[in-house]
Amino acid sequence: MNADEFVRSAQAGRRLFEDPDGSPTGLLEKVRDSFEVAGQLAAGDLAPQLLAWFPPLDGEVFSIREDHSGRAGDAGAIVEWTYRGVHRSETDKPTTEFNDTVATGRTVTVRGVTMMTVEPRSEGDGEPVFRFARFIDWIGVLGDIGATINWRLAVANEPPAQQ
Amino acid sequence: MITHANHVQNGVWQTALYSDMADWGIPSVGVYQGTGDVMVVSPSMASGGIKADGSVG
């Protein structure tokens, strides 16, 4: 779907999520029964951040692998998705976008899976709430913007550092 | 290279933890604070890019 379709899908997902007449378990059943609804909920969860960090390209912006999405276990649903945008700021001025990186203008492809379920609220009376988790290929995103990642384990100070 | 014995990461955001709709953010990377002894490691070991005196910032 293009940018406008992605935004409309996200808005529809937000409305479903906030429907005062709906219940979390009822929404989960809709998500498990319908790729369209599942995609709308996933879009609603993703759009605020992705559109801000990576403004959309012309053409296809968001796509869902329906053959890899759907029911997950007895009480979950997943959506495999791909988002394409540009690592730039809305003002086209140097600024800190996306994890304090200066916008590079590079095209970014974000791939991920959104998982949805209903679980008891951790605080208060433990009433059921509809929840989202996102497994995103951040290394691929960082590679697209030209970042390199390194990491190291804690090491013993032997031999001692020279003074 | 000169680094600290250990680093702690600031501002980690676990996007894979369950949360409400749109309540998530980019995991914070590359924002480290060195802890432990100041030490010398092989140049082939990625270090924190800290000053030679071990100070941070």
Image: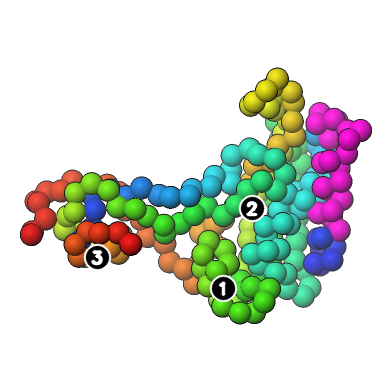
Which image quarter: residue A49? Answer: bottom right
Say left or right for A31 vs A146: right
The three-letter code of the residue at mark 1 reads Thr
Q: Determine the chain carrying the residue at label 3.
A: B
Q: Determine the chain carrying the residue at label 2.
A: A
In the rendered image, residue B50, in percent from the top left (x then y), is placed at: 28, 63
Badge 3 is on which residue? B51
In the rendered image, residue A39, in percent from the top left (x then y), is placed at: 79, 50
Badge 2 is on which residue? A112
The three-letter code of the residue at mark 3 reads Lys
Where disc 3 sits, the SS reads loop
- Look at the image and say whether residue A100 sits in the magenta stretch: no
Image quarter (top left, top right, bottom left or bottom right) of the N terminus of chain A? bottom right
Q: CA distance from mark 1 to mark 3?
A: 26 Å
Badge 2 and badge 3 both on one subunit = no
Residue A36: in sight, yes or no? no
Magenta segment boundaries in residue numbering? A8-27
Which image quarter: residue A50? Answer: bottom right
Image quarter (top left, top right, bottom left or bottom right) of the C terminus of chain A? bottom left
Say left or right for A11 vs A50: right
Badge 1 is on which residue? A95
The three-letter code of the residue at mark 2 reads Gly
Residue B35: in sight, yes or no? yes
Question: Residue at point 66% right, 46% down?
Answer: B23
Q: CA distance from mark 2 to mark 3?
A: 37 Å
Closer to viewer: mark 2 or mark 1? 1
- A7 up-or-down from A38: above or below: below
Which image quarter: residue A21? Answer: top right
Question: Residue at point 67% right, 23% down?
Answer: A124
Discs 2, 1 touching: Cβ within 8 Å: no
Question: Residue at point 30% right, 64% down?
Answer: B49
Discs 1, 3 touching: Cβ within 8 Å: no
